[in-house]
Image: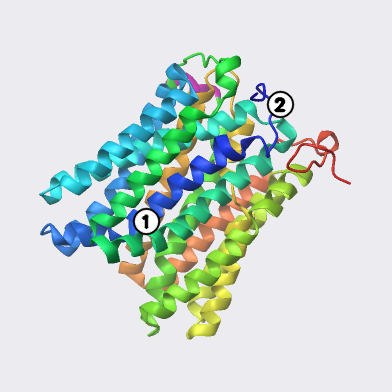
Amino acid sequence: MSPAHGTATIRDLGLSVYLPALLFSAGQGAVIPIVALVARDLGASVAVAGFVVAIRGIGTLVFDLPAGALVSRLGERRAMSIATAMLIASLVGCVLADSVWLFAICMFVMGCGWAVWLLARMAYVSDVVQPHLRGRALSVLGGTQRIGNFVGPFLGAAAVAAMGLDGAYYVHIVLAVASLGVLVALPSPDDETPVVHAPVSFRAVGRDHGAVWRTAGVGALCIGVLRACRQVVLPLWADHVGIDAAAVGIIFGISSGMDMALFYPAGMASDRWGRKFVAVPCMTLLSVGFVLLPLAESFWPLVLVGLVLGFGNGLGSGIVMTLGTDFAPAVGKAEFLGVWRLIGDVGTAGGPLLASAVAGLAGLPPASVVVAAIGFLGAGVVVTRMPEPVHRASVPMTDEAGGIAT
């Protein structure tokens, strides 16, 4: 028996939300490291291979708004099934592709499917979870995706060693099929209490929620910039100071471990003390990490910077999704979330471009400082301008089963 809408606890979401997310993310993690290598094997230059790597994110960015419309018209569960089918088709295409441009098209479609899947998951959780558990529910979703992306490369590496580069795609296909099987087999609140998302125009969404875009939206944009630049500026600086690739991998592993350890405590803090309590420290600590980065000129100082960045990012686990669902209206929710995801994805895509441009003109230290300034700006806007969505006095502390915590 599935929970009714608005009554689900975190434990209720284990199989219907977190297991498919883990499978999906692990498959993604298996594929991402080999995309550039496959493109090179198909004859791409280094520049074209870099474009192919980026085009999956471009597909996600381009499809954020259509994803909102699709979820609004079909509902979350059907949209997720379609997104998974799109992903499986794109993966089969990647295996069969005999040219770099066909491969690039498949990667673009993969990004489109990912946009639909992520938005549908976010809308689904906001529909079914108890409101006072929303921060934890979405932080666990963010943490599950982090765990999947951490485990996936190891699964992909094992498959590549056994079957060649296509092995990583086979891993993703198997996990995506398993995810679709879970979605189809498990009962859902949609089976008993269908949710109808009344479609509205994106123009109306933009007009009616301008205050949200100027406050919480700025925060989401800045978090996207910080997170994306963390994956670009840190390894480039490490290479600049003479640290080899293996050591950089260790630094990222340590940083990721710190990141993954914090997702549930961050959600608890968000539900108990408010969204600002985690969003502002998230941006502030990430910004401090970027300020400190140019001062780190050897392995251990970079490990410390990585820990600061990992701690800041871990505090913000799920916060962008949580803020989006907090501010989403009852009518036009899916379209609102489509615009919301577009804002965050613009930051994710645009941040590395900005950092690269500044680095090309003035060097990596100024680029790191510019990224930090964006983070401090976002923190300032959130703390001074954004309304706090959580009324602290009315938010009980509950465990994952929904009982009141002592």
Looking at the rendering, which quadrant does residue 315 occupy? bottom right
Residue 384 vs residue 350, the one in the foreground: 350
Quarter placement of the N terminus: top right
Tell me: 355 left or right of 405.
Answer: left
40 relative to 291, above or below: above
Residue 69 vs residue 241, the one in the foreground: 69
C-alpha gap between disc 1 and disc 2: 35 Å
Q: Which residues are drawn in magenta?
A: 203-208
Image position, residue 12 (x, y; %): 66, 35
Residue beneath the point at 53% across and 14% down: 196
Image position, residue 154 (x, y; %): 41, 63
Tag 2 secondary structure:
loop
Q: Which residue occupies the extreme right position in the image?
A: 406
Q: Main secondary structure of the magenta part?
A: helix
Which dot marks residue 30?
A: 1
Contact check, label 1 and label 2, Cβ < 8 Å: no
